[in-house]
Image (cartoon, helix red, strand yellow):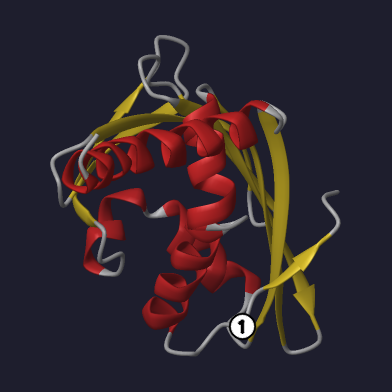
Amino acid sequence: MSRRRILLGAALASPLLAVGVLWAAGASLPRTHVVALSARLKASPTEVWHAVTDFEDAPSWRPDLASVTLGQTEDGHPTYVEVDNRGRRVAYEVVEARFPDDLVVAITTANLGYGGSWSFSIHPDGDGTDLVITERGFVRSALGRAMDRYLGGRGASLRRYLGALGTKIGEPITPREVSPP
């Protein structure tokens, strides 16, 4: 066998081997996950509540969103559909909303490779607010779990959201991982 064929075979096998290793790593990870991030904000709990519940305004401060369309379920729960800058649509339902303390939003789009909910806990802390967002989610595929864990990082979407929220309210936010409530 020529050296050229050996190199070509290795070049073709390497990506397959990498995908296989990622798949095996993902298969060893749990399908579900829980991650919580906390942030201390100077804004009042009411200001934070209004920022996180004004879903229609989110594209003005979340750079990943192109649009949001509001709606409601048959039993009156608020819903909204986010369309990101790549045209992907994800539908959500507000499962619980207790002004100004607690908000739970769940993904309702069924054909995604992931799903779950975000719980917002908003509480006064001196002259500001303590915000904890807890993601309770799942990733269907082993390859998706590996990419989420090793390439995206735990809580990556929460960190992006909190960074954008900081821009919205005019202060930098430094989230820290905390034990989920």
Can you give x and y, in whole percent of width and height, for residue 160 in the image? 45, 66
Residue located 40% across and 9% down the image:
74
Inspect the image, locate mark 1, and give the three-letter code of the amino acid beneath it.
Thr
Residue 4 percent coordinates (x, y):
17, 46
Q: Badge 1: how crowded within 10 Å, few (<14), some, or many (20+)? A: some
Against 101, residue 147 (above or below) is above
In front here: 82 or 56?
Answer: 82
Vertical arrangement, residue 181 with respect to residue 71, above or below: below
Circle 1 residue: 174
Report whether 88 appears left or right of 26. Answer: left
| Point 27% across, 41% down: residue | 6
Find the residue positioned furthest to the top: 74
Q: Residue at x 37, y 21 (%)?
A: 109
Residue 152 visible, this angle: yes
The percent position of residue 96, horizontal first and vertical second, equals: 62, 33
In percent of width and height, residue 101 lies at 70, 55
Query: Picture quarter containing residue 112?
Result: top left
Mark 1, secondary structure of its residue = loop
Residue drawn 46% across the image and 52% down it: 53
